[in-house]
Amino acid sequence: MSVGNDVVDLADPETRLCGLHPRWGERVFCSAERKALEASRSPHRLHWALWAAKESAYKARKRREPEAVFSPKEFEVELSPLPTTRGGGVAVGRVFHRGEVFELEVRLDGASVHAVATSEDEAGARVLRGVERALCDPGVAARRLAATTIGSALGLDPAGLRIVHRPPVAMHRGRRIEVGVSLSHHGRFVAFACTLADPAPP
């Protein structure tokens, strides 16, 4: 199951546009994306929404093709206008990469951007996702968030569910669960996305 996600902490010092290399935009964004950024009233939010979209599509592609290499400019993002309020909202779109199309959903709030990309053949699959502040090691926190949410959705005791390996695999009491899982973290936040084979839990 091909799913990818990426979270960006908008308050992290790394996200300050003034601190990026002068040629960063040319290296990362295609011409249409650069034009959208130049015209945007919220270039900071759009910049990192596009970046998270590219990262999430790359992770989805790499699940299927482990030899895939991240070349950001090759992942071309088509995204609906971002929510106009600082409080947050959802933008949808697609990411194109070497003949493959990924469905995209980007959620923004006042503090973070979270993008989830799924391959076209995931149409009809149920998508679970979540973002929260990390109160411990981010790797541990992301796996715990995923296990708790997946366990609840499938009616399984989260205490018996583990997210292991790379790429992540969900296990319940030693048995693999056929779901696709993607984990991410940045700054104060951890996140995950997961696709379930059926549109509703059993």
Image (tube, rainbow, N blue to C red):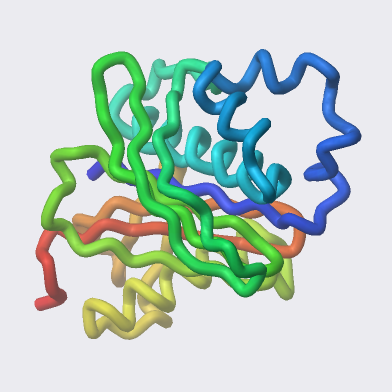
Q: Nearer the viewer, residue 137 or 2?
A: 2
Question: Going by the image, does 81 lie left or right of 202?
Answer: right
Q: Is residue 117 above or below residue 125?
A: above
Picture coordinates of residue 39, whole percent (x, y):
63, 36
Expressed as whole percent of the image width and height from the top left, the position of residue 18 reads: 89, 35
Asked if one can make out residue 83 in the rendered structure from this viewpoint, the answer is: yes
Quarter of the picture holding the N terminus: top left
Q: Quadrant of the C terminus?
A: bottom left
Q: Nearer the viewer, residue 68 or 96?
A: 96
Q: Quadrant of residue 65?
A: top left
Q: Nearest the camera: 151 or 35?
A: 35
Name the image quarter holding residue 199: bottom left
15 relative to 22, above or below: below
Above or below, 134 against 193 in this view is below
Q: Position of residue 8 (x, y in %)?
A: 65, 51
User: In the image, what residue occupies the spot 49% across and 40% down?
Assistant: 53
Look at 21% across and 63% down and name the residue there: 126
Can I make out residue 168 in this image?
no
